[in-house]
Image (cartoon, rainbow, N blue to C red):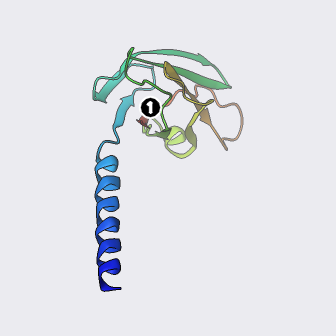
Amino acid sequence: MKTLISLLSVLFLMAGAVSASAAVKTALYSAYINKDGTLATQSPYWIERVEYSSQPDYAASYNVKFMPGSFKEAPKFCVVSADDKSSYEHTLYGNAKLSGKPTREEVNVIGLMLGLDGPSGDSSTSFYLVCGK
């Protein structure tokens, strides 16, 4: 019985080591994109370009194009977080959201001014983008 318990504990330790090494291989890609669609920083080099357009009083659209070969499959996840301190209204009401499911080639982000009384004006916003394999 002691031998069986010892064998099982060794197997669990080996399984834990394998899962830990798999977790280490998870790659995170991060970027900071300015409200005008310019790419401020990225790590590693994974974004080829950002296509930006804005409709006054509606939304701003950011089509983030990945470098070819950055992802063999669609990213497992992407998250976006608004970070715009250009005005009081943008700080309080500015929001960035994913607009659709990421693909191997791109991810879409929209900027919105949610909760603002009256017309939203320019909904462009700076944001952080993080994707993982």
79, above or below 45, in the image: below
Q: Which residue occupies 29% across, 23% down? A: 45
Q: Quadrant of residue 47?
A: top left
Image quarter where the C terminus lies is: top left
Which residue is identified by label 1? 126
SS class, disc 1: loop
Crowding near the residue tagged with mark 1, few <14, some 14–19, many ≥20 C-alpha atoms within 10 Å: many
Q: Which residue occupies 33% across, 65% down? A: 11
63, above or below 111, in the image: above
Q: Nearer the viewer, residue 114 or 9?
A: 9
Residue 116: % across, % down: 66, 41
The reply, left or right, for residue 128 in relation to residue 44 is right
Q: Nearer the viewer, residue 112 or 4?
A: 4
Q: Amino acid at mark 1?
A: Ser
Q: Residue furthest bottom?
A: 1
Q: Nearer the viewer, residue 14 or 31?
A: 14
Image quarter where the N terminus lies is: bottom left
The reply, left or right, for residue 117 in relation to residue 65 is right
Q: Which residue occupies 34% across, 59% down? A: 15
Residue 31: % across, % down: 36, 31
Residue 50: % across, % down: 45, 17
Residue 91: % across, % down: 49, 43
Q: Which residue occupies 54% across, 46% down? A: 92
